Image: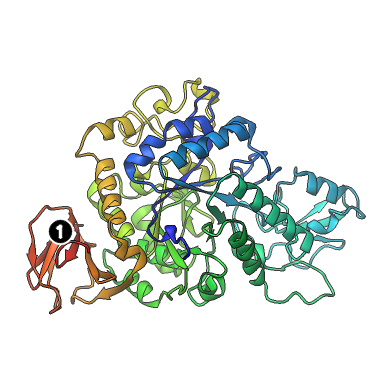
């Protein structure tokens, strides 16, 4: 029987270089990450997702890779990585890593060989054109920053395609040799113990855009089947988590009932969630949940609040996006790429813990596997003085000490400046102070994570949206193996209540609430405070 561990996992995303610096050079490293796994264990994390840690010029936070088989020397050695893996394993945590193979750095030896000689065996590893393509600005991913998707290379005397920045030339994934190399990269890291990959930019990875060939290209999604089949043979329990900002109509092609991507990030649901939070009504999110297709088979949606990129609101209408901007980032400097916000979760709510707790409870109650961005569990804010998406990637705030306990290096040597001013500075917001106090934000989130881990009904079971006659409430019912949990969330700043018209419920036992209460009769009133939440187990303990 397949090990579907990801169904009830809690995934925590870490940027190694911003997490903990053990050697005092100003950059986080694997030794520091291993030293801080107790924090993740206390939170209840079961799986760590690592942002890129490979050798890189670091022009795009490591997503411009120059060697897929190594470790950035600033972060440690392969030996340090293996020691970290063992430390995670000792705590029962799995590790998944970023697989970034849509493009490489322009400093990668493959690209250097490709550009140097038109007869090089690496020439066809990238997408080249001798003549200038007709529309070199079509498909720009970073409006206002990126100028084109094709760039002329003087050495090659040809144009190369890059869906992202010009220092990130696209690999030609229609080339069978390139595909074999991708599988070899996966095999290397699987042999070192990882439990799968978060696959970067999947729609761009599989598209044959710009490729000139006389051969039929076939279904581009077949590449995902190929990757999945290799993974299954090498490590049956390993997973593929797709970064794919796609419509719900496209989702079945990516899942193929779990025979392609094991999990797909629910970008549509995420954007409707923030629209609901902005409007203070559950209606947009409720409609999204009703429209979202079941992955079927072994597939699973991944749900999230924030991540290492901008909050992408590009699928909303201009009016809807404007509502979210007004609610969570009215200053133009908070907005980016004409579609998103470069802010952390806590600052979008101005540090309001009541609303933040409701948002976290909602995340953990949604059907799917929750993914948490490092630092959000203590309510960190961003640094808007940093360029683009770097604003949300500041060093983890461990204590009120020098550099927030992140590093002993002089401040000017830090990989990124620590947030040292304002209400979100490490003097006010840090892990040490919060772990010491049982009534802290961190402990509230840890309690929610504990409730989620003890509720396999949400991760494994079917979820129904219950109509309680109030658009400002979201009530979900999750069932699995004869057990059932009902969750309720109040999107407004006023107290609310609802009843469950279900003859099959005799008693509701509170598991998690913002206002502690005793057992509730099945037909009794369920009260929610302003921006309140509750998790209720039906008819006694889980059996």
- 511 relative to 24 in the view: left or right: left
Is 251 drawn above or below residue 412 in the view shown? below
Q: Of residues 512 and 322, which is closer to you in this image?
A: 512
Q: Nearer the viewer, residue 306 or 331?
A: 306
Q: Quadrant of residue 530?
A: bottom left
Return the x and y of residue 212 as percentages of the image width and height.
82, 69
Where in the figure is residue 531, as x and y percent of width and height?
A: 21, 57
In the depicted structure, whether residue 277 falls above or below residue 253: above
Q: Which residue is mark 1?
A: 510
Q: How many marks?
A: 1
Residue 513 seen:
yes
Is residue 508 toward the left or the right of residue 80 in the image?
Answer: left
Q: Secondary structure at mark 1?
A: strand
x%, y% of residue 351? 29, 44
Q: Who is closer to the viewer here, 236 or 383?
A: 236
Residue at the farthest right position: 119
Q: Colour scheme of this structure image? A: rainbow
Q: Position of residue 483 (x, y in %)?
A: 24, 68
* Residue 359 visible at all: no
Task: Classify the position of the C terminus by image quarter.
Answer: bottom left
Say above or below: 452 vs 388: below
Residue at 89% over, 52% down = 120
Q: Residue furthest front?
A: 1
The residue at 60%/32% (across/down) is 79
- For mark 1, does the 10 Å Cα neighbourhood hold few (<14), some (14 to 19), or many (20 or more) residues? many
User: In this image, 524 relative to 29: left or right?
Assistant: left
Residue lying at 25% horizontally and 72% vertically, measured from the top left: 482
């Amino acid at each position: 029987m397949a090990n579907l561990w990801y169904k009830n996992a809690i995934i925590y995303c870490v940027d190694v270089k911003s997490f903990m610096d053990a050697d005092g050079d100003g950059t986080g490293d694997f030794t520091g990450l291993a030293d801080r796994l107790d924090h993740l264990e206390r939170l209840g994390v079961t799986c760590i997702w690592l942002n890129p840690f490979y050798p890189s010029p670091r022009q795009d936070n490591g997503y411009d890779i120059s060697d897929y088989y190594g470790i950035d020397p600033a972060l440690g050695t392969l030996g340090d990585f293996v020691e970290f893996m063992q430390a995670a394993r000792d705590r029962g945590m799995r590790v998944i890593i970023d697989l970034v193979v849509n493009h490489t750095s322009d400093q990668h030896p493959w690209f250097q060989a490709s550009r140097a000689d038109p007869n090089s065996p690496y020439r066809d590893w990238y997408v080249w054109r001798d003549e200038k393509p007709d529309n070199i600005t079509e498909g720009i991913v970073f409006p206002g920053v990126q100028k084109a998707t094709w760039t002329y290379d003087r050495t090659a005397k040809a144009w190369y395609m890059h869906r992202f920045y010009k220092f990130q030339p696209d690999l030609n994934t229609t080339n069978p040799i390139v595909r074999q190399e991708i599988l070899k990269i996966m095999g290397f890291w699987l042999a070192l113990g990882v439990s799968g990959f978060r696959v970067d930019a999947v729609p761009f990875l599989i598209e044959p855009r710009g490729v000139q060939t006389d051969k039929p290209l076939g279904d581009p999604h077949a590449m995902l089947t190929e990757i999945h089949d290799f993974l299954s043979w090498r490590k049956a329990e390993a997973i593929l988590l797709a970064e794919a900002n796609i419509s719900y109509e496209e989702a079945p092609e990516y899942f193929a009932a779990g025979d392609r991507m094991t999990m797909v990030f629910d970008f549509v649901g995420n954007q409707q969630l923030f629209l609901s939070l902005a409007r203070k009504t559950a209606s947009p999110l409720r409609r999204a949940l009703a429209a979202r297709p079941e992955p079927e088979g072994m597939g699973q949606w991944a749900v999230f609040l924030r991540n290492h990129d901008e909050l992408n609101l590009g699928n909303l209408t201009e009016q809807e996006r404007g509502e979210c901007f007004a609610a969570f980032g009215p200053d133009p400097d908070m907005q980016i790429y004409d579609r998103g916000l470069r802010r952390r979760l806590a600052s979008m709510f101005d540090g309001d813990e009541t609303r933040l707790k409701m948002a976290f409870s909602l995340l953990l109650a949604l059907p799917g596997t929750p993914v948490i961005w490092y630092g959000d569990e203590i309510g960190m804010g961003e640094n808007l003085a940093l360029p683009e998406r770097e604003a949300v990637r500041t060093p983890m705030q461990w204590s009120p000490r020098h550099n927030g306990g992140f590093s002993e290096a002089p401040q000017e040597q830090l990989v990124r400046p620590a947030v040292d001013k304002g209400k979100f500075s490490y003097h006010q917001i840090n892990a040490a102070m919060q772990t010491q106090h049982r009534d802290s934000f961190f402990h509230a989130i840890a309690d929610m994570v504990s409730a989620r881990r003890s509720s396999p009904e949400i991760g494994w079971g079917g979820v129904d949206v219950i109509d309680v006659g109030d658009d400002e409430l979201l009530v979900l019912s999750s069932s699995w193996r004869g057990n059932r949990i009902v969750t309720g969330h109040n999107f407004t700043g006023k107290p609310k209540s609802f009843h469950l018209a279900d003859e099959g419920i005799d008693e509701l036992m509170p598991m998690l609430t913002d206002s502690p209460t005793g057992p509730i009769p099945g037909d009794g009133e369920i009260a929610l405070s302003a921006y309140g939440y509750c998790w209720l187990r039906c008819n006694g303990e889980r059996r």
